[in-house]
Protein backbone atom coordinates (compact mmCIF):
# COMPACT_ATOMS: atom_id res chain seq x y z
CA UNK A 1 0.00 0.00 0.00
CA UNK A 2 1.42 3.39 -1.00
CA UNK A 3 2.09 6.01 1.65
CA UNK A 4 -0.48 8.35 0.11
CA UNK A 5 -3.16 5.69 -0.05
CA UNK A 6 -2.43 4.75 3.57
CA UNK A 7 -2.65 8.42 4.56
CA UNK A 8 -6.03 8.71 2.84
CA UNK A 9 -7.39 5.65 4.64
CA UNK A 10 -6.09 6.82 8.00
CA UNK A 11 -7.68 10.22 7.41
CA UNK A 12 -10.94 8.51 6.43
CA UNK A 13 -11.04 6.47 9.63
CA UNK A 14 -10.37 9.60 11.66
CA UNK A 15 -13.05 11.58 9.83
CA UNK A 16 -15.65 8.82 10.27
CA UNK A 17 -14.85 8.54 13.98
CA UNK A 18 -15.07 12.29 14.55
CA UNK A 19 -17.93 13.34 12.26
CA UNK A 20 -19.83 10.21 11.31
CA UNK A 21 -20.82 9.14 7.82
CA UNK A 22 -23.22 11.99 7.12
CA UNK A 23 -20.52 14.45 8.06
CA UNK A 24 -17.94 12.82 5.81
CA UNK A 25 -16.93 14.88 2.78
CA UNK A 26 -14.39 13.60 0.29
CA UNK A 27 -12.71 17.02 0.13
CA UNK A 28 -12.27 17.04 3.92
CA UNK A 29 -10.60 13.63 3.82
CA UNK A 30 -8.30 14.76 1.04
CA UNK A 31 -7.33 17.86 3.04
CA UNK A 32 -6.55 15.86 6.18
CA UNK A 33 -4.55 13.35 4.13
CA UNK A 34 -2.63 16.14 2.39
CA UNK A 35 -3.63 15.04 -1.13
CA UNK A 36 -5.79 16.44 -3.90
CA UNK A 37 -9.43 15.33 -4.24
CA UNK A 38 -8.52 14.09 -7.71
CA UNK A 39 -5.95 11.67 -6.29
CA UNK A 40 -8.49 10.39 -3.80
CA UNK A 41 -10.99 9.69 -6.57
CA UNK A 42 -8.21 8.04 -8.58
CA UNK A 43 -7.62 5.52 -5.80
CA UNK A 44 -11.22 4.91 -4.72
CA UNK A 45 -13.51 6.05 -7.57
CA UNK A 46 -16.36 7.24 -5.34
CA UNK A 47 -17.53 7.70 -1.75
CA UNK A 48 -18.67 4.09 -1.33
CA UNK A 49 -15.35 2.85 -2.68
CA UNK A 50 -13.59 5.01 -0.10
CA UNK A 51 -15.81 3.73 2.73
CA UNK A 52 -15.25 0.12 1.68
CA UNK A 53 -11.49 0.65 1.68
CA UNK A 54 -11.76 2.37 5.06
CA UNK A 55 -13.58 -0.69 6.45
CA UNK A 56 -10.74 -2.94 5.31
CA UNK A 57 -8.19 -0.53 6.80
CA UNK A 58 -10.03 -0.49 10.13
CA UNK A 59 -10.20 -4.28 10.18
CA UNK A 60 -6.48 -4.63 9.35
CA UNK A 61 -5.54 -2.13 12.06
CA UNK A 62 -7.69 -3.99 14.59
CA UNK A 63 -6.09 -7.30 13.65
CA UNK A 64 -2.68 -5.79 14.33
CA UNK A 65 -3.44 -4.49 17.83
CA UNK A 66 -5.48 -7.57 18.78
CA UNK A 67 -2.35 -9.67 18.42
CA UNK A 68 -0.04 -7.31 20.32
CA UNK A 69 1.64 -8.84 23.35
CA UNK A 70 1.27 -12.43 22.17
CA UNK A 71 3.86 -14.81 23.55
CA UNK A 72 4.96 -18.21 22.31
CA UNK A 73 3.97 -19.65 25.69
CA UNK A 74 0.36 -18.45 25.38
CA UNK A 75 -2.28 -21.13 25.06
CA UNK A 76 -4.77 -20.97 22.20
CA UNK A 77 -7.47 -19.91 24.65
CA UNK A 78 -5.25 -17.16 26.04
CA UNK A 79 -4.70 -15.83 22.50
CA UNK A 80 -8.43 -15.97 21.85
CA UNK A 81 -9.16 -14.11 25.09
CA UNK A 82 -6.54 -11.47 24.32
CA UNK A 83 -7.97 -10.98 20.84
CA UNK A 84 -11.50 -10.36 22.15
CA UNK A 85 -10.41 -8.08 24.99
CA UNK A 86 -8.14 -6.19 22.61
CA UNK A 87 -11.17 -4.68 20.87
CA UNK A 88 -11.89 -2.54 23.95
CA UNK A 89 -8.88 -0.53 25.10
CA UNK A 90 -8.35 3.07 26.13
CA UNK A 91 -5.77 3.69 23.44
CA UNK A 92 -6.49 6.47 20.93
CA UNK A 93 -6.20 4.25 17.86
CA UNK A 94 -8.47 1.60 19.40
CA UNK A 95 -11.09 4.16 20.44
CA UNK A 96 -10.97 5.72 16.97
CA UNK A 97 -11.29 2.31 15.31
CA UNK A 98 -14.25 1.41 17.53
CA UNK A 99 -16.00 4.71 16.86
CA UNK A 100 -15.55 4.33 13.10
CA UNK A 101 -16.69 0.69 13.09
CA UNK A 102 -19.81 1.43 15.16
CA UNK A 103 -20.66 4.37 12.89
CA UNK A 104 -20.29 2.24 9.75
CA UNK A 105 -22.40 -0.51 11.29
CA UNK A 106 -25.19 1.91 12.21
CA UNK A 107 -25.04 3.66 8.83
CA UNK A 108 -25.40 0.36 6.95
CA UNK A 109 -28.96 0.13 8.31
CA UNK A 110 -29.85 3.09 6.08
CA UNK A 111 -27.17 2.96 3.36
CA UNK A 112 -27.72 -0.30 1.52
CA UNK A 113 -24.52 0.11 -0.49
CA UNK A 114 -22.52 -0.31 2.74
CA UNK A 115 -24.08 -3.62 3.71
CA UNK A 116 -22.12 -5.95 1.44
CA UNK A 117 -18.68 -4.45 2.26
CA UNK A 118 -19.56 -4.48 5.96
CA UNK A 119 -20.76 -8.09 5.79
CA UNK A 120 -17.56 -9.12 4.05
CA UNK A 121 -15.37 -7.35 6.62
CA UNK A 122 -17.39 -8.80 9.49
CA UNK A 123 -17.06 -12.27 7.98
CA UNK A 124 -13.27 -11.91 7.98
CA UNK A 125 -13.33 -11.04 11.69
CA UNK A 126 -15.68 -13.93 12.47
CA UNK A 127 -13.43 -16.32 10.54
CA UNK A 128 -10.41 -15.15 12.53
CA UNK A 129 -12.16 -15.80 15.85
CA UNK A 130 -13.60 -19.10 14.62
CA UNK A 131 -10.10 -20.26 13.70
CA UNK A 132 -8.86 -19.31 17.18
CA UNK A 133 -11.73 -21.27 18.73
CA UNK A 134 -10.92 -24.32 16.58
CA UNK A 135 -7.27 -24.12 17.66
CA UNK A 136 -8.32 -24.02 21.32
CA UNK A 137 -10.58 -27.04 20.72
CA UNK A 138 -7.74 -28.95 19.07
CA UNK A 139 -5.67 -28.40 22.21
CA UNK A 140 -8.48 -29.55 24.47
CA UNK A 141 -8.76 -26.11 26.08
CA UNK A 142 -12.43 -25.48 25.36
CA UNK A 143 -15.48 -27.61 24.70
CA UNK A 144 -15.26 -29.71 21.54
CA UNK A 145 -19.04 -29.57 21.19
CA UNK A 146 -19.03 -25.90 20.20
CA UNK A 147 -19.56 -24.87 16.59
CA UNK A 148 -16.58 -22.52 16.00
CA UNK A 149 -18.34 -20.25 13.52
CA UNK A 150 -21.61 -19.91 15.45
CA UNK A 151 -19.66 -19.25 18.63
CA UNK A 152 -17.51 -16.68 16.84
CA UNK A 153 -20.63 -14.86 15.60
CA UNK A 154 -21.96 -14.77 19.17
CA UNK A 155 -18.70 -13.52 20.66
CA UNK A 156 -18.03 -10.84 18.04
CA UNK A 157 -21.62 -9.60 18.36
CA UNK A 158 -21.14 -9.39 22.12
CA UNK A 159 -17.93 -7.40 21.63
CA UNK A 160 -19.75 -4.98 19.32
CA UNK A 161 -22.60 -4.51 21.78
CA UNK A 162 -20.28 -3.92 24.73
CA UNK A 163 -18.15 -1.61 22.59
CA UNK A 164 -21.15 0.61 21.87
CA UNK A 165 -21.99 0.94 25.57
CA UNK A 166 -18.32 1.52 26.38
CA UNK A 167 -18.03 4.30 23.80
CA UNK A 168 -21.12 5.95 25.31
CA UNK A 169 -19.43 5.64 28.73
CA UNK A 170 -22.30 3.55 30.08
CA UNK A 171 -19.71 1.00 31.20
CA UNK A 172 -16.00 1.24 31.94
CA UNK A 173 -13.22 -0.61 30.18
CA UNK A 174 -12.86 -2.82 33.22
CA UNK A 175 -16.60 -3.61 33.22
CA UNK A 176 -16.52 -4.49 29.52
CA UNK A 177 -13.57 -6.82 30.05
CA UNK A 178 -15.28 -8.44 33.02
CA UNK A 179 -18.41 -9.14 30.97
CA UNK A 180 -16.34 -10.58 28.13
CA UNK A 181 -14.33 -12.83 30.43
CA UNK A 182 -17.52 -14.08 32.04
CA UNK A 183 -19.03 -14.82 28.63
CA UNK A 184 -15.92 -16.69 27.52
CA UNK A 185 -16.11 -18.89 30.62
CA UNK A 186 -19.84 -19.57 30.23
CA UNK A 187 -19.87 -20.17 26.49
CA UNK A 188 -16.56 -21.89 25.94
CA UNK A 189 -15.94 -24.00 29.04
CA UNK A 190 -16.77 -27.66 29.37
CA UNK A 191 -20.07 -28.06 31.31
CA UNK A 192 -18.25 -29.64 34.25
CA UNK A 193 -15.53 -27.01 34.39
CA UNK A 194 -15.89 -23.67 36.13
CA UNK A 195 -13.06 -21.29 35.31
CA UNK A 196 -11.82 -18.51 37.52
CA UNK A 197 -12.98 -15.34 35.68
CA UNK A 198 -9.89 -13.48 36.90
CA UNK A 199 -7.49 -16.05 35.46
CA UNK A 200 -6.67 -14.17 32.29
CA UNK A 201 -6.83 -10.62 33.57
CA UNK A 202 -3.31 -10.38 34.97
CA UNK A 203 -1.87 -11.99 31.82
CA UNK A 204 -3.60 -9.58 29.45
CA UNK A 205 -1.91 -6.16 29.40
CA UNK A 206 -4.76 -4.03 28.12
CA UNK A 207 -4.55 -0.29 28.64
CA UNK A 208 -7.33 1.05 30.87
CA UNK A 209 -8.66 4.52 31.38
CA UNK A 210 -7.28 6.11 34.56
CA UNK A 211 -9.88 6.37 37.26
CA UNK A 212 -10.94 9.92 38.02
Image (tube, helix red, strand yellow):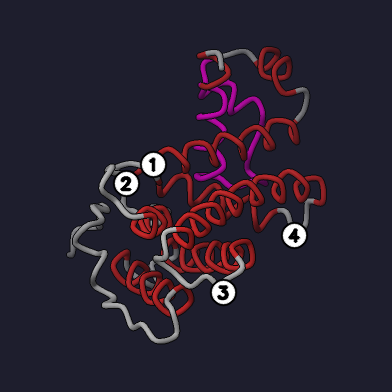
Sequence-wise, the earlier of marks 2 and 4 is 2
Which label number is shown at residue 65? Answer: 1
At label 4, counting other C-alpha atoms closer than 10 Å, the crowd grade (few under 14, some 14-19, many 20 or more) is few
Q: Could you say which is closer to the camera, residue 201 or residue 77?
A: 77
Sequence-wise, the earlier of marks 4 and 3 is 4
Q: CA distance from mark 1 to mark 4?
A: 28 Å
At label 1, counting other C-alpha atoms closer than 10 Å, the crowd grade (few under 14, some 14-19, many 20 or more) is some
Please tell me whether mark 1 or mark 3 is closer to you in this view.
3
- Contact (CB < 8 A) between labels 4 and 3? no
Report the residue at 66% width, 51% height from top. 123
Residue 18, horizontal then vertical, whole percent:
50, 44
Q: Does 109 sit above or below residue 199? A: above
Read off the residue under disc 4.
109
Q: CA distance from mark 2 to mark 3?
A: 36 Å
Report the residue at 54% width, 39% height from top. 58
Q: CA distance from mark 2 to mark 4?
A: 28 Å
Which label number is shown at residue 145? Answer: 3
At label 3, counting other C-alpha atoms closer than 10 Å, the crowd grade (few under 14, some 14-19, many 20 or more) is few
Q: Does 37 sit above or below residue 128? A: above
Sequence-wise, the earlier of marks 1 and 4 is 1
Dominant secondary structure (helix, strand or loop) of the stretch shown in magenta: helix
Amino acid sequence: MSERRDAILKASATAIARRGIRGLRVNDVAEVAGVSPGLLYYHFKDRIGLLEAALNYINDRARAYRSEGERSSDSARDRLTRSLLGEIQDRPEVVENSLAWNELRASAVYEEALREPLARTTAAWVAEIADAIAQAQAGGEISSSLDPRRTAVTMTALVEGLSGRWLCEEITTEDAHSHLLGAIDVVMSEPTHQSDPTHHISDTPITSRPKE
